[in-house]
């Protein structure tokens, strides 16, 4: 399966989905003009990946900021990961946040309460 790599811009995050390594990364800011359009290839890729996932999938989310429409799309990404987790595959979600960014920590906790996968909250100390 081809990796999905999207270079980040000031409005969109850097995306690196690698099926061979079982690593999924989203980093940066997520305020695209059209969130649904931006996240559709990610959700489609995960739909394909869940047919034959690695024994362990590591998910690294390191967002500085995301808007409301992105939050719904990010939830869609997590729902695909939840399906992989429910199929008895190991999914580890690392949620990175800046040490003084309470909002981003809370956002991670909110996702964790919706999605039945444990999150590892990782504080980034400058």
Image: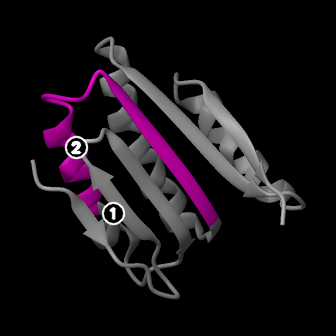
User: Which secondary structure lies at badge 1?
Assistant: helix
**What's the mark number on residue 19?**
2
Q: Along the horizontal axis of the image, is 42 left or right of 119?
A: left
Q: Along the horizontal axis of the image, is 60 left or right of 47?
A: right
Residue segment shown in magenta: 40-63
Q: What residue is drawn where x is 67% and y is 51%?
A: 96
Residue 57 colored magenta?
yes
Residue 8, how many percent across, how many down? 43, 79
Q: Is residue 48 above or below residue 74?
A: above
**What's the mark number on residue 39?**
1
Instruction: Choose the circle earlier in sequence order: 2 or 1.
Output: 2
* Residue situated in front as seen by the camera: 92 or 78: 92
Q: Along the horizontal axis of the image, is 126 left or right of 16?
A: right
Q: Is residue 30 above or below residue 9?
A: above
User: Which secondary structure lies at badge 2?
Assistant: loop
* Residue situated in front as seen by the camera: 116 or 15: 15
Residue 25, how many percent across, how many down? 43, 54
Residue 48, how many percent across, how many down? 13, 41
**Outermost residue, top direction?**
88
Q: Nearer the viewer, mark 2 or mark 1?
A: 2
Residue 47 colored magenta?
yes
**Callout 1: few (<14), some (14-19), or many (20+) C-alpha neighbours within 10 Å?**
many
Disc 2 to disc 1: CB gap under 8 Å: no
Q: What residue is drawn where x is 40% and y is 28%?
A: 82
Residue 66, how many percent across, how many down? 60, 68
* Residue situated in front as seen by the camera: 50 or 79: 50
Q: Is residue 105 above or below residue 92?
A: below
**Callout 2: few (<14), some (14-19), or many (20+) C-alpha neighbours within 10 Å?**
many
């Amino acid at each position: 399966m081809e990796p999905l790599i999207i270079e980040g811009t000031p409005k969109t995050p850097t995306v690196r989905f690698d099926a061979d390594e079982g690593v999924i990364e989203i980093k940066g800011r997520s305020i695209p003009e059209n969130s649904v359009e931006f996240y559709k290839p990610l959700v489609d890729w995960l739909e394909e990946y869940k047919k034959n996932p690695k024994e362990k999938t590591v998910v690294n989310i390191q967002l500085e900021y995301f808007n409301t429409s992105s939050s719904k799309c990010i939830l869609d990404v997590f729902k695909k990961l939840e399906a992989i987790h429910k199929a008895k595959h190991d999914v580890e979600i690392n949620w990175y946040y800046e040490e003084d960014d309470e909002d981003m920590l809370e956002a991670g906790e909110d996702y964790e309460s919706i999605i039945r996968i444990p999150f590892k909250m990782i504080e980034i100390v400058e």
